[in-house]
Amino acid sequence: MLMKECRRKEPLFRALKFALLLIIMISASASCPASHSLQAAAKKRISLPRYIFLFIGDGMGAAQVKLSSTLLEGGHALAMTSFPVLGMATTHASDRLITDSGAAGTALATGKKTTIGTISMAGNHLDTLQTIAEMAKAKGMRIGIVSSVGIDDATPACFYAHNASRSNLYDIARQMALSGFDYFGGGYSLGNFPENQAKSKAFKGDITELMQSAHYVIARNKTDLASVKPGGRCWAYSNYDRKGALSFAMDSHERETSLAEFTREGIRLLDNPKGFFMMVEGGKIDWACHANDAAAVAHDIEAFDKAIATALAFYRSHPGETLLVVTADHECGGLSLGNTANGYETRFDLLRYQKISLQRFAEKVSTWKQQGTVTFDMALDSVKVYFGPGNVDAASPLALSTHDRNALQETYLTTMKIEAPGTKDNDTFSPTVCALLNNRAAIGWSSNAHTAVPVQVFAIGRGAEALNGFYDNTDIAKKIIQIAGLKPR
Ligand SMILES: [Zn+2]
């Protein structure tokens, strides 16, 4: 009986002895130098951000940001301009002062300079440059790539593909299927358009099928995307135009998935204990700048900023482990706020009269041309409806002078002439209408192309202080590599 009780108590006694030993070991190790270094290492591990966001406003110079914030309704401020850290970056390519999205995207994705039109390869077009997204994947983080333009357009491509030319769209799109990244969202694959499939020397089949074979769930609309379960791979797109892009924000319909929704869903799908890297591009800002369409620029920056706001909300719930960086790949259009016609006065509020993008208006003009029944007076009515200027009180800033009317009529008549077969459609009327409103609003444009003006860098979160100052665009990637503890090959 006594023996039995002793045997029953023996395991309990052994457990107590083990616990005592453990307490002694822990208290002894707390004061030894080796444990100090262990603690320091653990602290260092904790201090690395697990969630990295890189937002790229394509073509988004400082003037574009200021214009958009000026036009925000209801006294709202842009999320990006609330960030505590501000830097400025030069954008030149290795072979040209004025860059393109290939060379600039490569700089932001790899920390290395390359030549115009190159996608994450060295200027010799032989060496592949490893991207921060690939480094993050090697570290076990999940990866998301989002863009409002084609998902194989230069900027997003620079994070997952390596190609000597940004125009090899099908070959770039194929690399999306081979990347092993977890989430692609936004525009459609330009490379999967038949004309681009035909251009490839290495056609391997439809991109959607290649993506499915690589275990990507294809989400073609909002409902599809909302039903995708986290953990797997997903390629999500929405309504897209002839260039594979989302609509300009000011033309967008609520059934279309917005850049903010693609970002929010991306966070939902990517969130995991090992962290994630997500690149989000506001690509249509650049397209609006190329068109010198200030109202469309302002709206697309607002849409881009709403995507940033979803990441900012995530940052607020994970402040110690999130880094958020917002920048641009280059300025586009040479936008200036103020022009000779207005001197020191500005009337940016006039841009609110513009209801659709210049591109959407030009599509209407093209339809009129085919119909051949729209008179100049009818066209002027449409100008008033969609842009504001017209037959109004002469004192109004929207009143058309005889000179304006004549200029519009001349371009209208030229635009309506049917060109010889095979000749390019030459619409000079739509850009004249848009320029008229921009001019009244005191907006100046110096170019239809990119410029060499440095761009802003906004940052918040773990390690963001490193992004203070004036540096080169390659330094942005280098700083992210350092802050996030990524290990280049
Ligand atoms: Zn551009």
Image: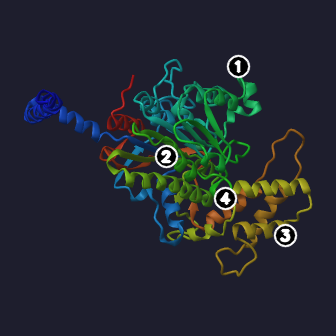
Of residues 212 and 201, the one nearer the viewer is 212
Q: Are marks 2 and 4 in contact (CB under 8 Å)?
A: no
Up the image or down, 237 lies above or below 65; here it is above
> Is label 2 or label 4 in front?
2
User: Which label sits on residue 267?
Assistant: 2
Q: Quadrant of the C terminus?
A: top left
> Is label 1 or label 3 in front?
1
Q: Are marks 1 and 2 in contact (CB under 8 Å)?
A: no
Amino acid bearing label 1: Lys
- Left or right side of 170 for 318: left
Residue topped by disc 1: 201
Amino acid bearing label 2: Ile
User: Which label sits on residue 254?
Assistant: 4
Amino acid bearing label 3: Asp
Task: Residue 44: give x, y in percent of width and height.
Answer: 25, 37
Give me the residue at 78% from left, 52% from top: 427
Query: Can the viewer see residue 154?
Result: yes
Amino acid bearing label 4: Glu
